Image (cartoon, rainbow, N blue to C red):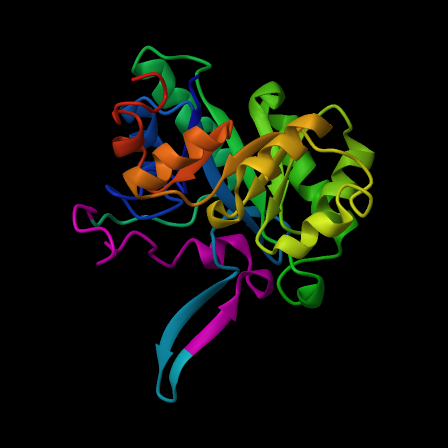
């Protein structure tokens, strides 16, 4: 059995997360799925960023600026390509937080150049929190509509998945575009106590934190018709354990390891 390898925020071992360089590098490695994070700016553009803020240094110490309080052209002035000490091989580059349409256009053009057209699936995580409505993002209904606007304009809807921890976003998006592929991210085991009743439907994917995964959970979710993709699985032994438990895929910071690990992904 082979499992799907998803590049978490791109190929983070080589370039800063959620940058165009990281996404293109993931394609070069042979990844067929990239996972990326979505936030929103004040002018209602979908910005690819894990954190919904930018931190700057000021006289009084670090200051946090919400992306939702800034227009997209302001956000683009801040470099996000500095190499992280967490990834010793990571190369620093000058990079701005890209807009979602930029990611689609850049990666699709890169796939054409390397002879792999239409080869990438985009797993989009909508960053949303019930206690941050109006602070980090608009209401779930407006937020979902903004994301779906960019998906509809992409021309590659069949290769796009929409996931979130926030069930409200998934419910709103499902009501607007029921034909899309959805995924529920799960960090706390209590979520499964009311699943799928609280969400209102069984998504195509349920993506739990990897330490929540056991054989019984995988069997339960498969019985409901959902595939299981565990996150964030970085150690080779954890990757192999997920495969033994029967997951359908893993989200990893190290696809360069997973893609060539004997016993994983058909290697």
Please, which residue is most extreme toward the bottom here?
60
Horizontally, is 113 left or right of 71 in the view?
left
Residue 244, percent from left and from top? 43, 29
Residue at 69% over, 67% down: 131
Vertical position of residue 220 compared to residue 142: above or below: above
The magenta stretch spans residue 154: no
Residue 120, percent from left and from top? 45, 22
The image quarter containing residue 251 is top left
Horizontally, is 162 left or right of 25 in the view?
right
Vertical position of residue 172 compared to residue 156: above or below: below
The magenta stretch spans residue 89: yes
Residue 234, percent from left and from top? 33, 43
Q: Nearer the viewer, residue 145 or 257?
A: 257
Q: How many numbered marks are there?
A: 0
The magenta region covers 63-91
Q: Nearer the viewer, residue 53 or 249?
A: 249
Horizontally, is 256 left or right of 135 in the view?
left
Residue at 41% over, 43% down: 9
The image quarter containing residue 159 is top right
Predominant secondary structure in magenta? loop
Residue 218, percent from left and from top? 58, 34
Vertical position of residue 119 compared to residue 31: above or below: above
* Quadrant occupied by the C terminus: top left
Residue at 35% over, 16% down: 266
The image quarter containing residue 255 is top left
Residue at 68% over, 56% down: 190
Horizontally, is 173 left or right of 75 in the view?
right
* Quadrant occupied by the N terminus: top left
Please, which residue is most extreme toward the left here?
89
């Amino acid at each position: 059995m082979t499992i799907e390898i998803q590049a978490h925020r791109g190929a983070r071992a080589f370039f800063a997360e959620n940058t165009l360089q990281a996404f293109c590098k993931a394609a070069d490695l042979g990844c067929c799925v990239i996972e990326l994070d979505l936030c929103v700016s004040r002018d209602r553009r979908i910005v690819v960023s894990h954190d919904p803020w930018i931190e700057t240094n000021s006289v009084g110490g670090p200051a946090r600026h919400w992306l939702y309080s800034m227009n997209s052209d302001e956000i683009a002035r801040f470099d996000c390509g500095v190499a992280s000490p967490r990834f010793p091989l990571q190369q620093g580059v000058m990079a701005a937080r890209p807009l979602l349409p930029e990611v689609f256009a850049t990666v699709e053009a890169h796939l054409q150049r390397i002879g792999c057209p239409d080869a990438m699936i985009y797993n989009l995580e909508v960053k949303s929190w019930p206690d941050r409505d109006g602070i980090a993002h608009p209401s779930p209904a407006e937020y979902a509509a903004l994301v779906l606007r960019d998906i509809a304009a992409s021309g590659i809807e069949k290769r796009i998945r929409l996931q979130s921890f926030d069930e409200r976003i998934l419910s709103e998006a499902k009501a607007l575009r029921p034909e899309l592929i959805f995924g529920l991210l799960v960090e706390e085991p209590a979520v499964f106590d009311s699943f799928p009743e609280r969400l209102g439907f069984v998504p195509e994917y349920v993506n739990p934190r990897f330490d929540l995964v056991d054989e019984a959970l995988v069997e339960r979710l498969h019985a409901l018709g959902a595939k299981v993709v565990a996150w964030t699985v970085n150690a080779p032994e954890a990757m192999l354990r997920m495969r033994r438990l029967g997951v359908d895929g893993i989200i990893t910071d190290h696809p360069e390891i997973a893609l060539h690990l004997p016993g994983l992904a058909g290697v």
